[in-house]
Image (cartoon, rainbow, N blue to C red):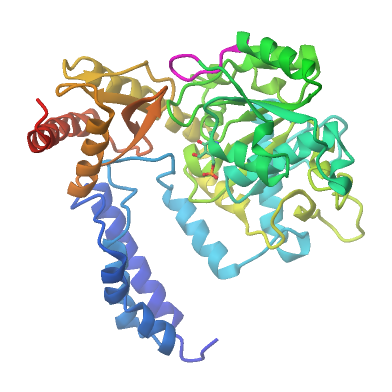
């Protein structure tokens, strides 16, 4: 390290600026987002200069950081109601600082014993929520027969790939050495997150191996559609590698009938994978856990802590009902080897795609240490309940249409005053984002375009949604006047 580097000075600047940033964001000061051209930003951030010359002083750091923070997506702003990314708990941010400065790549135990221990403990906590943990307490690492297992990875997309790789090893163990057999398919809700199809293609199975299962008008898997598809697949000489269900769907936030899918998989002896990236968090709330009924019938599940568990990106869990399947995902090491070495601890590296793996579990641990599991459950419940209240505001308004009552914290609606044209919804979203007062998203449900909110922020209230309604009406008028629509 450059000897003249004055860490305390930079820390103090970052610390002061972040405190002000969080305070002002929480108070809803200024815009949620301002998007300037990247060329202008690169200039203001003096990127080329600093890369070439280095030696940034505390004063320059302060100036550049100010520009940086001005040009962030303000996730802590109560009018940030966009995507399914957490508004991180401040403690997760502190954990990020500790991780960033200590940098313990704990995929092998000796490279970060404390971080590795935290990861296994929070994995056991997550397994316990699903009903797959048999230990005496969450830091019970003894090898118990029939216990669940799991590991953290950098995101739900990687987690889906890992779990599906384990599913393939279960039905076709030879595939690791010989490549994928040509007769494997996966039954996937027609609206599954794209990372599922992407994983299957990455695995060399080809996207034609993704067999869509019909969903209803609100994009929930229709369980009665499973058997006919399964029969058809069998008749064509194919084998089903896995059945996937959403908990919940990315577009609508609605939960697939997990119990019924579980029953189908058990009856037909099929690997059942639950994509709980967003909605598995319901398991933490006694009031909402019923939404996940039947999830414990699965063989594998993914769960993103960087969505509804208030952890900053990324921190995703792959959970297995049977720990034996963990080692099979990447057969370069065949078994569950936690205790095969003379040194203390366990190595997580055999079970993830990553070789150098950061201390993801520490971020979840420190967040839980601040909130406790009860606090976390309360957070999930509040966000889910609040979203139902917001739904009432939209559905009570004559110019808005909501296709369904939300189950989670995702809500879709259309502004119908000027017609049902999909382009109007998109144009409204674009204009709202340009104005920067709110950040919202948009999705298609069965071919119809909707505006979409994901209520991630604790501070978003009905008053903010009332203001959003007024802004949409204003923007709607402006757009339709411009395009000649009535
Ligand atoms: C249902 C579902 N699965 C998987 C993912 C992918 O997760 P990640 O963004 O962490 O890769 C998402 C992301 O939104 C999702 O909604």
Residue 172, horizontal then vertical, whole percent: 86, 35
Location of residue 15 (image quadrant): bottom left
- The answer to whether 349 is drawn above or below residue 402 in the figure is below
Residue 403, horizontal then vertical, whole percent: 34, 17
Outermost front residue: 236
In the picture, the quarter occupied by the C terminus is top left
Q: How many marks?
A: 0
Outermost top residue: 224
Location of residue 99 (image quadrant): bottom right
Is residue 104 a member of the stretch shown in magenta? Answer: no
Residue 25, horizontal then vertical, whole percent: 26, 51
In the picture, the quarter occupied by the N terminus is bottom right
Nearest the camera: 194 or 64? 194
Asked if one can make out residue 122 in the rendered structure from this viewpoint, the answer is no
Nearest the camera: 26 or 469? 469
Nearest the camera: 269 or 369? 269
Q: Is residue 44 left or right of residue 305?
A: left
Residue pictured at 48% horizontal, 37% vertical: 308
Q: Is residue 196 left or right of residue 285?
A: right
Residue pictured at 73% horizontal, 44% vertical: 204
Q: Is residue 175 left or right of residue 189?
A: right
Is residue 221 a member of the stretch shown in magenta? Answer: yes
- The answer to whether 205 is drawn above or below residue 451 in the figure is below
- The answer to whether 113 is drawn above or below residue 78 in the figure is below
Residue pictured at 68% horizontal, 10% vertical: 228
Residue 439, horizontal then vertical, whole percent: 28, 43
Q: Main secondary structure of the magenta part?
A: loop
Asked if one can make out residue 173 in the rendered structure from this viewpoint, the answer is yes
Residue pictured at 69% horizontal, 22% vertical: 296
Q: Is residue 207 left or right of residue 311?
A: right
Q: Which residues are magenta?
A: 216-223
């Amino acid at each position: 390290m450059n000897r003249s580097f004055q860490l305390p000075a930079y820390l103090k600047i970052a610390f002061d600026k972040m405190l002000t940033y969080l305070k002002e964001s929480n108070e809803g000061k200024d815009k949620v987002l301002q998007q300037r051209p990247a060329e202008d930003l690169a200039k203001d951030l003096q990127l080329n200069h600093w890369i070439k010359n280095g030696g940034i002083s505390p004063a320059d750091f302060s100036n550049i950081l100010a520009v940086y923070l001005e040009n962030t997506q303000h996730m802590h702003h109560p009018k940030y109601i966009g995507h399914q990314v957490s508004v991180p708990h401040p403690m997760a941010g502190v954990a990020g600082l500790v991780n960033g400065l200590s940098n313990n790549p704990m995929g092998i135990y000796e490279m970060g014993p404390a971080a590795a221990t935290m990861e296994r403990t929070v994995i056991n906590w997550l397994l316990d929520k699903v009903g797959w943990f048999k230990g005496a307490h969450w830091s019970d690492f003894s090898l118990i027969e029939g216990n669940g297992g799991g590991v953290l990875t950098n995101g739900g997309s990687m987690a889906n790939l890992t779990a599906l790789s384990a599913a393939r090893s279960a039905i076709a163990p030879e595939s690791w050495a010989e490549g994928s057999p040509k007769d494997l398919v996966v039954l996937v809700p027609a609206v599954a997150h794209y990372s599922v199809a992407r994983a299957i293609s990455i695995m060399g199975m080809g996207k034609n191996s993704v067999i869509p299962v019909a969903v209803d008008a609100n994009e929930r898997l229709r369980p009665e559609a499973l058997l006919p598809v399964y029969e058809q697949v069998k008749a064509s000489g194919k084998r089903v590698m896995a059945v996937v269900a959403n908990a919940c769907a990315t577009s609508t936030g609605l939960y697939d009938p997990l119990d019924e899918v579980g029953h189908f998989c058990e009856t037909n002896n099929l690997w059942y994978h639950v994509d709980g990236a967003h909605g598995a968090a319901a398991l933490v709330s006694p009031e909402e856990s019923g939404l996940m009924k039947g999830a414990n019938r699965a063989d594998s599940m993914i769960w993103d802590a960087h969505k509804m568990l208030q952890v900053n990106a990324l921190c995703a869990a792959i959970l297995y009902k049977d720990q034996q399947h963990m080692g099979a995902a990447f057969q370069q090491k065949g078994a569950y080897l936690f205790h095969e070495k003379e040194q203390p601890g366990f190595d997580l590296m055999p079970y993830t795609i990553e070789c150098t793996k950061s201390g993801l579990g520490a971020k979840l641990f420190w967040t839980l240490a601040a909130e406790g599991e009860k606090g976390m459950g309360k957070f999930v419940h509040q966000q889910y309940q609040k979203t139902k209240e917001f739904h009432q505001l939209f559905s009570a308004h004559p110019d808005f249409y909501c296709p369904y009552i939300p189950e989670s914290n995702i809500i879709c609606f259309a502004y119908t005053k000027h017609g049902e044209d999909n382009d109007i919804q998109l144009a409204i979203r674009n204009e709202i984002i340009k104005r920067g007062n709110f950040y919202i998203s948009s999705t298609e449900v069965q071919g119809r375009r909707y505006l979409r909110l994901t209520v991630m922020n604790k501070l978003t209230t009905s008053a903010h949604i009332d203001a959003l309604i007024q802004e949409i009406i204003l923007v709607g008028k402006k757009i339709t006047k411009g395009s000649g629509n009535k």
